[in-house]
Amino acid sequence: MKYLGARTRVIDWEARTNGSFQYTADVKLDGLLEGVILRSPYSHAKILRVDTSRARTMPGVHAVITAADFPPGARYFHEGVPDRPPLADGVVRFIGQEVAAVAAETRLQAQAALRAIVVEYQQLPGPLTTAAALGRGVSRLHDRQSGVDNVSRSVLRDWGSAETGRRNSTVSVSGDFFFARQTHACMETNIAVAQWSETDQRLEFWTSTQAPYYVASEVANVMGLKQDQVICHEVGVGGGFGSKSKICEHEAIAGLLARLARRPVCVKLSREEEFETTKTRHAFSMSMQLHADSAGQLRVIAGKIDVDNGAYNHSGVSVMGAGIKGLGMLYRPEGLEVSGRLVDTALLPGGQFRGYGTVQTSFAVECLMDDLAEKLGVDPIDLRIRNANQSGEMTLVGAELGSARLVECLTAARDAIGWTREREKDNRRPGRGVGVSASVHVSGSFTMPGANRSDAAIDVFADSRVRVRFGGSDAGTGQKTILALIAAEELGVDLEAVDVQMMESDKTPFDMGAWSSRGTHYGGHAVRKAAVATAERLKGLAASQLGDGDLRLEDGMVKSAARGIPIGTIAQLSNDLKDGILSTETSFVETSVVQADRATGKGNVSPSYNFAAHAAVVDVDRRTGRISVLDYVAVHDIGFALNRITIEGQAIGGAVMGLGAALSEEIIFEQGKVVNPAYLHYALPRAADVPRIRPILIEGGDPRGPYGAKAIGECSINPPPSVISNAVYDAIGVRIRDLPITPDKIINALARREGRSRSHHIWRRPSRWWIAIVRAAYSRGLLKILHARNLRFASHVEPAPLEKVETPATLANVLSAMGADAKLMGGGTDLQLQRRLGLVEPKRLISLAKVAEFQGVKTLADGVIEVGAAVTLTALATAIRHRIPMIAQAIDKIASSQIREMATVAGNLIQAKRCWFFRNGFGCFKRLGGLAPCYAIEGDHRFYHAAIDGHRCQATTPSDLATALSAVGADVVIAGPDGERVVSMDAFYTGPGEAVLTEHEVVRSIRIRAGATARLGAFVKLRLWEGDFAIASVAITANISADGVLHDPRIVIGGLAPTPWRAQQTEGSLDGKPIEIGTFRAALDRELDRAAHPLPRNGWKLDAAAGLSEQALEAVLRAHEAAQAAPVRESA
Amino acid sequence: MQESLRLNVNGKATGVEVAPGSRLLDVLRENLGLVGSKEACGRGECGACTVLIDGRPVASCLVMAETVSGAVTTIEGLADEFADLRRAFADNGAFQCGFCTSGQLVRAAALIREEWPDNPDEREAFVRHRMSGNICRCTGYTGIVDAILLTAQARRSSAADRP
């Protein structure tokens, strides 16, 4: 084959890399309005009244809609009982649920109108966790058929004979596992442009979707239209990962707004809305067991699963079913007995997400497989090989495996990762471990009528160009290119001669879209069938010219042995031309599949099954809890790689998304509201957080796949969580069953195992008594009382417009321009965000970028280094890297290179606290004052809150630069109307991110004290992702004499207390002594124990900070040794 | 209320009428029709809107147009000069959905012009660190890193070959 199986650039690569590829936000229509959505501020409430009358009269407003504008009882289709209306219909069941929407000329006008809508709510209690939902006497969220309050659906799967299996077992392992809510975080936020044509009575969409078919059918359903009245147009789709494989909530809203406004409307979610209101992966709580015999034959998989449904059904029923089904496809137990409950909570609903249930259940079972191997005393890979399903088998759930190369995957993973070498006793290095995991996935599940069918059309033009028409959409999977490759291959034309048109409802034939890993199988077969039919037609037409002999398609021609004629010319011979085009449309129906039996859940739902084995080497830092993934291989049984570039891309991309779930990703709630709705707060992997992923493709074909190809898109996300848990266990002997495996869990598990704990003797510290009492009262109901008083969640709005941005050139002009209506701006990297979050609302901004006095890094006569306030972080790092490397090291770890180029020294020092409650709309004490609560006391404070000296607010000072500058000894020069004053860096802060500046003052420069360049130093930082704010950071500097004695050490810890915290007692105990790490650690631990008053879940930060401090001191020592080895050192 | 500004974008001096405090990203996309720069977060956290100002990568969603005095370069202005990098992106699977790609390419273009570590073993970590302000949710970064390493390598060797 010429094209299939090769490495081919995607056909639209030019447009996708030169900025011209059109996404929905780039669609320009005349009269386009902006649509915005009013959302529920309550987890559960009755809507007593909605009054939109004022909003309708506001300037620029063209439409205002509420539930009353949809047909009565409109509900989205779901598996299970359809329960979600497009706009809240009498009741809201989660914070962020859509209540009303406005279309106006501008976003600001639309938002102003939203504020004018009056909604009266009557709050209701609502369960905010699955445990609460299942407790006694709880309030019901829905009336469900299951007979149990807040259980939307329960299921018991009993396949094979679990009873016999148990009798035959001699070994069992079990565990309770938790898979957190991961969110897709597609780079393009959800967006749709809709336009209603009164003449045609049709609604047109440009929308970022994986499934145009579902958008049309669901919009038609909730708007009371016929499906053919709703059409989609082709547009770029900025990622999907399942989230866009059904309708998304903004789409019907855009449709109705456009219909009523009689103008096109764009509804685009902000990034915050995307995180706060779009459906997540369902969290699974799983209590699972494996039973096996002494020979290592798996006998039974058993367990109970509670699935957090969120507030509405969506795909919860089928995600739960698919998760259990996945357990019946990988191995060969005698029996499986798993029950599941889909539990309603008054939270953001779960939805479809790559991996779809299997990623959750396989995490539990693949960890248990390792536990079982250990108990049996066998190698984990051998155990998996022994139990692996094989080609030709029928699995427990009724899956007919045409091909199954799991054993080959496991063997390849073993070789590639160096399994045997890594596990060799003599090679073991402390903290280093290796882990493996296996997985299986469907290649398109036959979930509903029509899902086993896919149509395609091929057009041949007179100029011999070929166009494939296909109804699905390519959200980045590379499906479009694969369809083109197939057409080019079958029709013997150059790939360059093939165009592919997708998701144009009027022109592209039936396909349900890209979900359930169905793109390869269904799209592949559909286009192959259409192309083969086209080829036959062309040969038939050519017979009159070339004879009936052996004709073939090649080089864009139909060829006989003697000669060839271009296919376009041949096509013109047809009597069936339409507009001069020869079109052939065919329908592919997969007959080997059945819909799962409703009662048993069994059946061969997928035409093929794809397998994978992943393996990784990790390093676990026992001192900080940090896990580094050093090497990762992803081996996939994909039958045949239709296009190697995109198939490998799916393996790598899925693995990294799975690593995100393994290591850091989790949507966190407090009082029902999402705490971390931003890339800043939602820790997903950046380039420096993950290793090179090495994909290995196992081929050999599949009897049912197109050209032998099977799917890959979802299977690749399944193994990483268990790979990492297994590798961590191998490395340090602790089993983490609770995702994501963040550093706190490692430190806490190690402390538990080693029997370590810290004691802070609060009873001996009267200054902490009041705080301790208040904290205790919070958990006994005080938070509830204070929260109720302030229950108003702000959410992101477009910042208020500015009157002016001023760019003064001198300090004097800055001082005279300052005023209550103005804010000073350095790089603006925090100020712009604060405006967006409604933390500040200035009318004027005063840019400091061009103020002469604020520029430059200069060495003054006395050896002091003066750094202008408006010097960017990058500029400071460049200027100081060889003189005080520690400061450059600290800067390198701040945010991103883009932010470092913009952010200024002073701006970094006075940035506002990064507490995710304060920043993300919680009505907290620091926002509202008075009796407003601190949400961090009971909320998730594991990472970013103070463990020392927390009072009314638990936030910390976010600036790493402050930590570093404190450690070298620096002063801040502050200018004001009365001249300048100088404040020591140690005295600069009065609270978390709060400085001594008055409203009339401005930071002019920083002075790094003389002698700083002679000190040795190091800066280390623990964070969840590259560029994140510090969980804890440590800067240490000291003079070290040639004999290795430490003089005047400064030890400063960031992220641990409201302001950078100096370990002064430890400094004193080290001064004048040779460096001894053990003594240092003991002294620091004593001081931390005496000083700290951690919150219930952030005491681990003390261990981590102490561990970081050891590492910093070791680095200082290394610097000293290096300096001794090369005594000629450049000074200042 | 609108104010007139002069901007130098992709080598051309341009006059624009904007509201005070307009974001450079909006001016590029709405006023100048340069829609290659994307808004994915509007908070300076993802890199999709990265443009160069005097060759330095910045998040154009946080830059106010009034404060820009240097030369602005967007993906549209870099596409030709970095055709090799774009091809390498395509050949190494460095994009899937493509939404972050303009920002990745603009950041990478600046990176290719930066001073690189002499030690080849340090280059991958160097690239990963510098590129960590550009989130990609699809590719897992391996292809992006490879495309940048290979392009930089090819440019170095062709520069070395030049007489």
Image (cartoon, coloured by chain):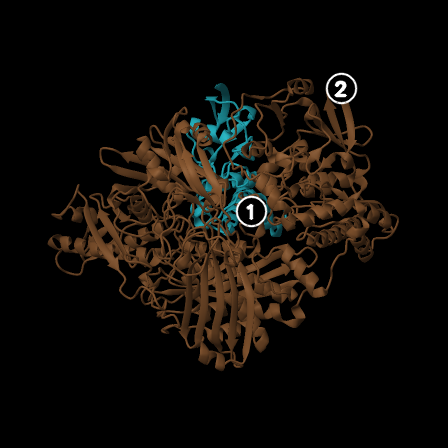
Chain colours: A brown, B cyan
Q: Quadrant of the C terminus of chain A?
A: top right
Using the image as rendered, state which of residue A330 and residue A494 is in the foreground. Answer: A330
Alpha carbon distance from label 2 to label 1: 47 Å
Going by the image, does A177 lie left or right of A524? Answer: right
Q: Which residue is mark 1?
A: A671
> The disc labelled 1 sits on which kind of residue?
Gln
Q: Residues within 10 Å of mark 1 (few under 14, many from 20)?
A: many
The answer for which chain carries disc 1 is A
Say if mark 2 contacts mark 1, CB within 8 Å.
no
The answer for which chain carries disc 2 is A
Q: Is residue B63 above or below residue A399?
A: above
Using the image as rendered, state which of residue A269 and residue A557 is in the foreground. Answer: A269
Which residue corresponds to the image point at 42% horizontal and 68% vertical from the top-left? A156
Going by the image, does A1083 lie left or right of A470? Answer: right
Q: Is residue A409 above or below residue A1071?
A: below
Going by the image, does A83 lie left or right of A798? Answer: left
Q: Which residue is mark 2?
A: A978
The secondary structure type at the circle numbered 2 is loop
Q: Quadrant of residue A829?
A: top right
Q: Position of residue A254 (x, y in %)?
A: 36, 38
Q: Position of residue A562 (x, y in %)?
A: 17, 56
> The disc labelled 2 sits on which kind of residue?
Asp
Is residue A882 among the parts visible in the rendering? no
- Mark 2 or 1, nearer chain start: 1
Q: Position of residue A1089 (x, y in %)?
A: 78, 53
